[in-house]
Amino acid sequence: MTTKYQRVLLKLSGEALMGSLPYGIDPKIVQGIAEEITDVAKRGIQIAIVVGGGNIFRGVKGASAGMDRATADYIGMIATVMNAMTLQDALERMGVPTRVQTAIAMQEVAEPYIRRRAMRHLEKGRVVIFGAGSGNPFFTTDTTAALRAAEIDAEVIFKATKVDGVYDADPQTNPQAKKFNSLTYSYVLANDLGVMDSTAIALCKDNSIPINVFNLSVPGNIRLALTGERIGTLVGGDCEIS
């Protein structure tokens, strides 16, 4: 089967895994995400995933409550591993071989992140989930997604969010907000549009990695996006602002 992409990176927020719950992990949401990833993986597309931990613990929030920022960020990194292992379990129950690699050593439950090993897993058709962020405090999982995408030579980053693309204002509070179909990295940085943090956008810009932002909550969107259908908003160096 001909597909647009050979190797992609999917960025999932921790909040995406909790669905309508106030915190934690909704098994039905994880099951639905796993089903769509399974379908895409069976088409021969190599899939790497970076998952956040905001459904369990968010470092910035902990720091704002008085915690040491580095300590809070490390706790957040551990939360991402919990999410990664949950998603791994769902995928493997569907027959998809999956490996979790972490930037902090947790050899009893996951492999350490090794770039060449990750790429070899992808070449063998295994889904690779990157946990524990970049292993460094003060960096977001958005930045981790950009970094890992560059390291493994991913063709595109898919960022799954709660809205159907990038807007010039918050569409949940401003009904007049305009949705963009495509944007340049420079426009996103200059206007602070919040697609990803500025470090992540700059990394993508420097390495010419396009970013496709789409709505995760619509069933089938992961399948559509990863197989090359044009949905959401595309950010890239040669994109027109529209």
Image: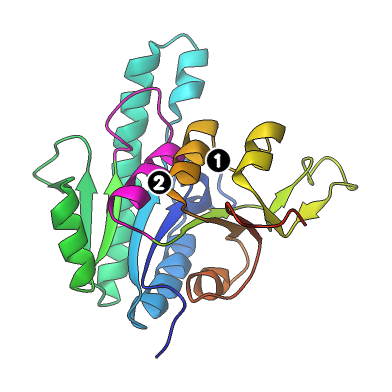
* Residue 214 drawn in magenta: no
Local crowd size for mark 1, using a 10 Å CA cut-off: few (<14), some (14–19), many (≥20): many
Judge by depth and name the residue closer to the eye, 134 or 236. Answer: 236
Q: Which residues are magenta?
A: 132-154
Mark closer to the chain start, 1 or 2: 2
| Residue 14 % position (x, y) | 46, 45
| Residue 148 % position (x, y) | 33, 47
Quadrant where the N terminus is found in the figure: bottom left
| Residue 75 % position (x, y) | 33, 27
Compared to residue 184, the image places residue 58 above or below, namely above
Quadrant where the C terminus is found in the figure: bottom right
Looking at numbered disc 2 in the image, what kind of residue is underneath it?
Ala
Residue 145 is tagged as: 2
**Tag 1–tag 2 contact (CB < 8 Å):** yes
Compared to residue 61, the image places residue 108 above or below, namely below
Q: Which residue is mark 1?
A: 196
